[in-house]
Image (cartoon, rainbow, N blue to C red):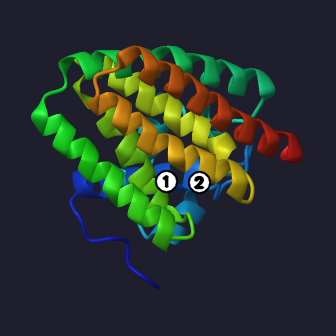
Amino acid sequence: MNKPMQLSSTKASSSIYDLLRRDLVGGRFKAGEKLAINTLKEQYQVGLSPLREALNKLAAYGLLIQENQRGFRVPKLSREELDDIARLRTELEGMALERAITHGDAVWEADLLAAAHRLKRADITLDKGEEWERLHTQFHRTLVAPCGSVWLLRFIEQLHDQFDRYRRLGPKMPTIRQELDEQHHQLVELALQRDASAARALMDDHIHKSYEVALARYQQHA
């Protein structure tokens, strides 16, 4: 039998939190599924204490539901929730982008160009797997990073994770994906031009197109 990961409790908890968060967002577990603690211990090779700590954090974050005396369950999906998430993403991410364009400096411009370049290379060389998802998330984080509000960035990241539970339900849609990829580059151009109004309008459209993808995938699984 394999031994649990030999890390300090804090490091083990952080590591299993990251792995579970990735797998919950990526759809490894079904919506509404109850998670068996012993099964998770075996699958992730982690001890009980750091596992429970990670599960509690994920419940507080909203990616799990903690049931009294009954463990943890993956949240169900609903059209109403998806609509709410998309609406809030539009409002908060648009606000953050406008602020970022106002406050971003030369270092931000360089970071944004680098993040866009890595994502563009991934668009060409990868099949939209986990590495592409990581670079995609990094790009969107970089885009709004200098908005000046830690809480706004936290809310946006949480909304992204919840949104991606829907977006990643089904197979890729190449035509829409190509259009969304092109919008990433247009967002960079508008940000560097400091055209906050046009950038926000494009971000609104970008989120709406992503919402259409997520909605189509949800409806296929509903």
Q: Residue furthest front?
A: 193
Q: Position of residue 59 (x, y in %)?
A: 51, 34
The amino acid type of the residue labelled 1 equals: Arg
Question: Is residue 48 shown above or below 206?
Answer: below
The residue that appears at 63% across and 43% down in the rendered structure is: 165
Q: Position of residue 201 (x, y in %)?
A: 52, 19
The residue that appears at 35% across and 36% down in the rendered structure is: 189
Q: Residue furthest left?
A: 106
The residue that appears at 65% across and 28% down in the rendered structure is: 208
How many callouts does the rendering have?
2
Q: Which quadrant is the C terminus positioned in?
A: top right
Separation of disc 1 and disc 2 at Cα? 6 Å
Location of residue 143 by image quarter: top left
Q: Position of residue 174 (x, y in %)?
A: 69, 58
Question: Is residue 176 shown above or below 91?
Answer: below
Mark 2: secondary structure? helix
The residue that appears at 44% across and 38% down in the rendered structure is: 186
Q: Nearer the viewer, residue 180 or 83?
A: 180
218 with respect to 98 (left or right): right
Location of residue 145 by image quarter: top left
Q: Position of residue 146 (x, y in %)?
A: 22, 25
Q: Is residue 4 in sight in this rendering?
A: yes
Q: Is residue 48 in sight in this rendering?
A: no
- Callout 1–callout 2 Cβ contact below 8 Å: yes
210 with respect to 5 (left or right): right
Say the numbered circle drawn on residue 26.
Answer: 2
Name the residue that disc number 1 marks: 22
